[in-house]
Image (cartoon, rainbow, N blue to C red):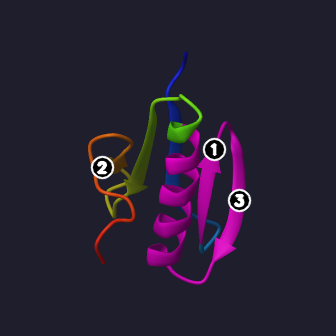
Amino acid sequence: MARAQYFVVHHDGQWKIRYDGTHYGPYASQALAIQQAINSAHEAGRLGHDAQVLVQGQNNQFRTEWTYGHDPYPPKG
């Protein structure tokens, strides 16, 4: 089974979540987009999928923010 990956991206001047090639949002802030992505990834994990949230940095590189089964839910913050 493929890993469900949720990418928090700054797209067209707005924070969005990209999942499976589709953008969702926009969200009022990066933090809100991350929280929603984690909620979605957590649900995917509960359904038996490996799930991960990655966040786009200023250099357009992605860093892992949250991984189902490895990080607490809900996350501290």
How far from the left and from the top, in percent, is residue 57?
Answer: 34, 60
Residue drawn at x 26%, y 42% as measured from the top left: 70
Residue 58 appears at what percent x and percent y? 33, 64
Q: Are marks 3 and 2 in contact (CB under 8 Å)?
A: no
Question: Which numbered marker is on residue 24?
Answer: 3
Task: Kindly identify which numbered label has been placed on residue 63.
Answer: 2
In the image, is 70 to the left or to the right of 42?
Answer: left
Give amino acid for label 1.
Answer: Tyr
Image location (x, y in percent) of residue 8:
50, 58
Queried whether the magenta region covers residue 41, the answer comes back as yes
Say left or right for 13 vs 77: right
Label 1, on which residue? 19
Task: Give, as a three-letter code, the residue at label 2.
Answer: Arg
Q: Residues within 10 Å of mark 3 (few under 14, many from 20)?
A: some
Quick one: 23 or 40, which is closer to the camera?
40
Mark 2 or 1 closer to N-term? 1
Instruction: Verify CB contact (< 8 Å) between mark 1 and mark 3.
Output: yes
Per the rendered image, the range of residues in magenta is 15-44
Decide: marks 2, 1 in contact (CB < 8 A)?
Answer: no
Front one among 55 and 70: 70
Q: As shown in the figure, which amino acid type bears the numbered disc 3?
A: Tyr
**Looking at the picture, does residue 72 appear above or below residue 31?**
above
Q: Which quadrant of the figure contains the C terminus?
A: bottom left
Q: CA distance from mark 1 to mark 3?
A: 8 Å
Give the residue displayed 50% in from the left and 49% down from the top. 42
State the separation of the CA atoms marked 2 and 1.
16 Å
Q: Is residue 59 left or right of residue 1?
A: left
Q: Residue at x 47, y 65 (%)?
A: 34
Name the quadrant containing residue 68.
Answer: top left
Q: Residue furthest front?
A: 46
